[in-house]
Amino acid sequence: MELKPEEEQQASLEMVRAAQEWLALDLADDAALDRYFDHWLYEVLGYARNENRST
């Protein structure tokens, strides 16, 4: 938000959505946690996937 103040409202809404999704997760479900992080890191934030990472 500091670098793109025009996106502050949308960023705030996305942070609330991420928090709500996190609170709804079953933290004992490793696959659900992986899906959550994959979604937010790669689909929403646009980070490149490291296909060579070990899980």
Image (cartoon, rainbow, N blue to C red):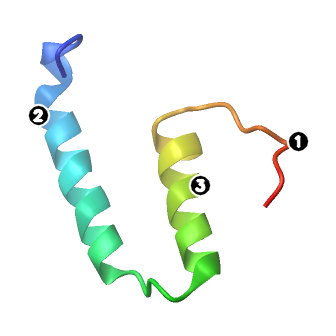
Callout 2 amino acid? Gln
Query: Which residue is at 13% across, 28% downward?
Result: 8
- The residue that disc 2 covers is 9
Query: Which residue is at 22% across, 13% downward?
Result: 4
Vertical placement of residue 25 versus 40, above or below:
below
Q: CA–CA distance between discs 1 and 2?
A: 35 Å
Query: Which residue is at 59% across, 54% downward?
Result: 38
Give the secondary structure at mark 2. Answer: helix
Give percent across and percent down for residue 14: 26, 47
Callout 1 amino acid? Asn
- The residue that disc 1 covers is 52
Q: Residues within 10 Å of mark 3 (few under 14, many from 20)?
A: some
Circle nearer the N terminus (1, 2) = 2
- Residue contact at pointers 2 and 3, CB within 8 angstroms: no
- The residue that disc 3 covers is 38
- Along the horizontal axis of the image, is 26 left or right of 23? right
Image quadrant containing the N terminus: top left
